[in-house]
Amino acid sequence: MSGSIAEDSLSDGFFSDVLEGLDIALFERICSSRFRPIGRLPLWFKSFYSPVEHQQYDLAMQSAFLENFLIDAEAYWESPSDKRSGSRLASGVWSEGGETVARPLEAFALVAARRSLLAIVDLSSNFEDQRQVYQRARELALGQEKLALELSQKQRELQAALEQRVLNQESLEVIANTVAGNASAVLICDAMGRMQVANKALVDIFHIESGASGQRRSVLERWLQEAEGAYPEIKRVVTSGSYWEGEFESQGITGEKKWIRLNIGPVLDSEGTVSHYICIANDVTDVHYGNHGQERFEDVDPVTQLPNRHSFWRKITQLIEQATTQHQQLALYYVDLDHFKRVNDSLGHHAGDFLLNTFAARIAHCVKRTDIVAHLGGDEFAVVAQVKQLGNIETIAQRLLDSFIPPVTIDSTDFRLSASIGVALFPADGLDATTLMKHADLAMFHAKELGRNQCQFFKPAIGARFLNRLNLENDLEAAIQRGQFELYYQPQICLAEETFVRLEALIRWRHPEQGFISPAIFIPLAEESELIHKIGLWVLNTACAYAQQFAGQGIKVVVAVNVSACQARRKDFIDIVEQALQDSGLPPEQLEIEITETSFLEQMDEVVTMLSKLRRMGINVSLDDFGSGFSSLTYLKSLPVDNLKLDQTFVRELPDHEESRAITASVIRLAHDLKMNVIAEGVETVEQLDYLRQQGCDYVQGYYFYRPLPGDELPPIFDQIMEAGSIV
Ligand code: C2E
Ligand code: MG
Ligand code: MG
């Protein structure tokens, strides 16, 4: 029999009109997960999904929700008619288009005239009633939330004020006097967690013996242990010198259970090491249980509408119990947005909330209905997915990373954000929720260290490395004095002249026990403290002296030096550069400063002024890793830079990947319009080189020509070039 329902019944357009009137998207299943529309598709449908070919749709690929439903639907369509339960199979409601107007949708699988049909229905209108009920519940919850917010704001202010006093080296005795009568509990400890200051509220609320300074099991240590149940990352956050705040259930000395809202602010000395911890705490048991001693009804995060940490914790515990008895595997993804704090600070909280909301909706679309997606607080999300096939674990990770690619438009400016993701698997990486969370958090932290915008799986070595990291920080101090740093140089080839005289200086650390440690790991560590300035100074001096040594042979080497955002923001940066040029005798036009976009995120005006000054001195400025972060093309024309360094992530995908091709071509065009040169990083194949050459790229750098080399391996290469006249 030829033809299908679509052709047979639509000839007079009657059926098509009926469907349109009902606003239903109807499909006939062609083969597994391929669907052909019957009649015209509603506009809303086309705004969410696009056909793959010949007007056919691969719905499982486009929606994680449908992917899940189609597994059940498949079984329904395949089963003999007398075995099918009911006249149709319903999917339950999900929503699509979270960023603008979310539409509640429901899908139905049915069989008519022995054809397998799928209908997708827009439930917007009858959803409105339900939405209003939810809205009222949220408003109640928000009232509660407001109380909590006011308290947390007070705690933060007190914490910041005390931090300033400790930094000003006021005596702890004086500080103790000023906080003695404060209603919030105040605890100040030394770096080892020993109690130095404890006010009356602390003693009253937590029944701590007054005057027991330096007691063996410190209050801080006990809190950290109690909070770790709900916040497995707490020790990592606090010991690495970051601020922490949250609520947890504590069992005081008397055994009475209390909910505590706690802030812990490590105070860093001028070397960047923790000298004190300032903790502010309040008993929030009443806020938690309301006046009736009931479980807090509010389980939804008001910004993202996702389950909050509290409810996540309950859900994951249940899911693990179920997985244990049913021998299932789970994957926990810990998702942390990259540089979110800066966006939030610079754009304001409304825009920040909008971004969180947008990404929450995108993340929720990456997994199935039965999986868990939660907003843990701040810029952190957690996803727990049941693993049916091992390959799915990576598919979901990729989907999550991809969900961050499309820019978010705020006030007609496009913002791009990425995320770092850590994954821990049940049962392989942990048998309980706390261990899994802790391991996923460490894997996420590792992803950040490796340069962000990526996903890392937990490995025992990562846990060990975190402990090592604390040691690394100490070792880093000694590394300069002990001469453990080396400077490598990677040539940049000028495509017009087919030769090179430009080098990028890249630092290497030869650790006595751990061997070579990548700058991708230790530079971010150094950036957290003052050490980056010492390291940066050493790099600048070494690189200038190196380039200048060829002057005698008539070779004019331009050397590019990477400069961290925090270095560039220092007031005396220009003086440091001037001094390095003077000491080495290197002419300014032979020095190039490489900065990344993050340098402009704070104090943009100052950085722009500083770079303009450098350029007036004759020094070149390059914008490194262009395209990897914010890459706002709108800003580009106002930045004082000579060269754009196209990020490796695009070059890697050339020439096959269409989007990377388009981006490369337009970046080169735009840069040339703005009178900038383009340097492509990470060129590894001849195909990449050919494409870049075709597009008019000015310089290339990558393993295809040279890896970064120790300084003494370059002179022979210079000699060869001088003889041959070119290298390409
Ligand atoms: P970057 O400035 O973007 O440097 C380019 C990185 O790409 C280098 O990694 C280089 O070894 C690597 N690379 C070059 N060609 C290829 C290629 O064909 N394929 C691949 N896969 N990679 C290639 P490296 O040396 O590990 O440095 C990593 C990052 O650490 C640098 O990224 C830079 O941001 C930072 N860094 C390195 N040295 C310094 C320094 O002296 N000061 C500061 N502040 N940061 C530095
Ligand atoms: Mg660089
Ligand atoms: Mg780069």
Image (spheres, helix red, strand yellow):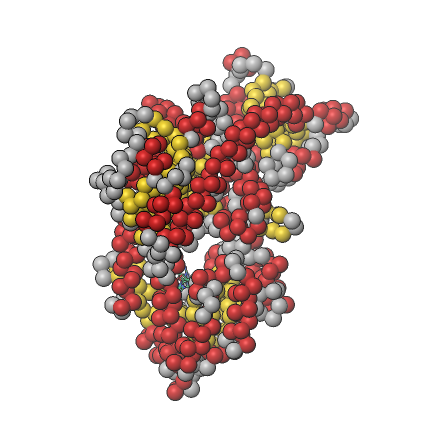
Vertical comparison of 472 with 389: above or below: below
159 to the left or right of 406: left
Q: Nearer the viewer, residue 87 or 321?
A: 321
Q: Quadrant of residue 671?
A: bottom right
List x then y, in percent, for residue 562: 43, 66
One can see residue 172 in this view: yes
Task: Please tell me which residue is depicted at 44% across the width and 33% down the height of the picture.
Answer: 309
Q: Quadrant of residue 566?
A: bottom left
Q: Nearer the viewer, residue 389 or 461?
A: 461
Vertical comparison of 257 with 158: above or below: above
Q: Nearer the viewer, residue 472 or 139?
A: 139
698 to the left or right of 237: right
One can see residue 119 in this view: no
List x then y, in percent, for residue 694: 57, 66
List x then y, in percent, for residue 443: 36, 45
State which quarter of the image contains the N terminus: top right
Vertical comparison of 645 with 337: above or below: below
683 to the left or right of 709: right
Q: Quadrant of ligand 1?
A: bottom left
Q: Residue furthest top?
A: 82
List x then y, in percent, for residue 42: 69, 32
Task: Please tell me which residue is depicted at 39% across the width and 72% down the height of the picture.
Answer: 540
Image label count? 0
Task: Please tell me which residue is depicted at 74% across the width and 25% down the height of the picture.
Answer: 21
Vertical comparison of 268 with 20: above or below: below
